Amino acid sequence: MRDSKMRRFWPAILRRLGLARWLNYNHALTVSGRTFLIPVQGGLGENLLKLTPDFKSEIIRLFGERLPDCFVDIGANLGQTIIDAFSVRSWGRYIALEPNPVAFAYLESLVKANRLPVERLPWAAGAEASPHNFCSQGTADPAATMAPQGRPGVYSPGMSQWVATSPLDLLIDLAALPSGVLMKIDVEGFEADVLAGATRILRDIRPVILCEILRAYVEPSIAFTNERMSKVEQILADQRYRIFYIEMENEISGRIRALREIASFPRGLWKDNPTGMDYLFVPAEMALPAFTGSGGLSLVREA
């Protein structure tokens, strides 16, 4: 018991003493009954030690057993969704895209430490095959983006770098994707470009997609952000997808309270309507699974 408590608390002690950033160590993390080994490398990976089951775990559990044994993770960062996905179930195939070299190198360590069947691709998904400027506020910034216009003045030119970008449709032949995979897109405002390069996947593979859609944070970005939202809505309409807003118990975090079908994303500044920004895109022909559980999860169709 004493050893167990020490393993649980000594990373926190290292952080409080300001020593964690200088040390490399592995720490066991248990999520939904499955234990993962988390490599912490000079402070990188510490945020993973705070992971707990949330709405992503629920979506993966809700749809994972009904879909093929394949998950596609667009914007894997340090592997937050990898841990969510494998805490819920085992995956025969897991394809992760991450263009940030530092984050990608960390993913290698995480995957190897846990012997997970994750195929790692070191590039970004976009509308076309070309280099793209990748902007961040730090070495493995989870808010890094290739659409900095959505947050004017936030990203320093000194922190940007060029990365390879390819259409997601290449995965149809490159990775031999099965029909109906589960996909996550978290690309900080670059969603329209990702989906524009995935029209064959949307048309032929028909994935269920968990996607973050950011709203404008400041007045100068409203027009840009609204235009991106309109492009996403048009692509989804053209490919016959339904949009569901993921309503959470704590507004922008926590477990799911309801999936609310909507026709369009909310516009305007986020501070004027500070609700969540996570959505589910479901092929129109797919019947949604029944919702059960103590959380009172329900399906709501907008009038």
Image (spheres, rainbow, N blue to C red):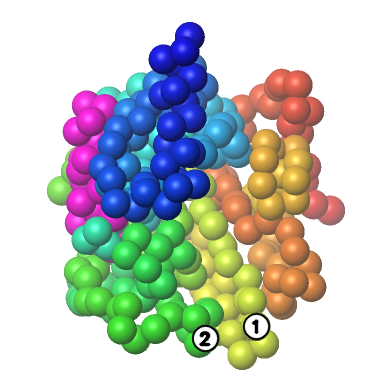
Residue receiving disc 2: 152
Q: Residue furthest front?
A: 17
The region drawn magenta spans 103-125
Q: Is residue 268 above or below residue 260?
A: below
- Queried whether the magenta region covers residue 26, the answer comes back as no
Q: Is residue 294 visible?
A: yes
When asked about the image quadrant of residue 34, the answer is top left
Q: Residue at x 60, y 39 (%)?
A: 55
Q: Residue furthest left?
A: 174
Left or right: 123 with respect to 54?
A: left
Q: Is residue 175 above or below residue 18?
A: above
Q: Residue at x 38, y 26 (%)?
A: 28
Q: Residue furthest top?
A: 1
When asked about the image quadrant of residue 91, the answer is top left
Identify the element where label 1 is drawn: loop
**CA gap, disc 1 and disc 2:** 8 Å
* Relative image position of residue 133 (x, y in whole percent): 29, 79
Checking the image for residue 218, the label placed there is: 1
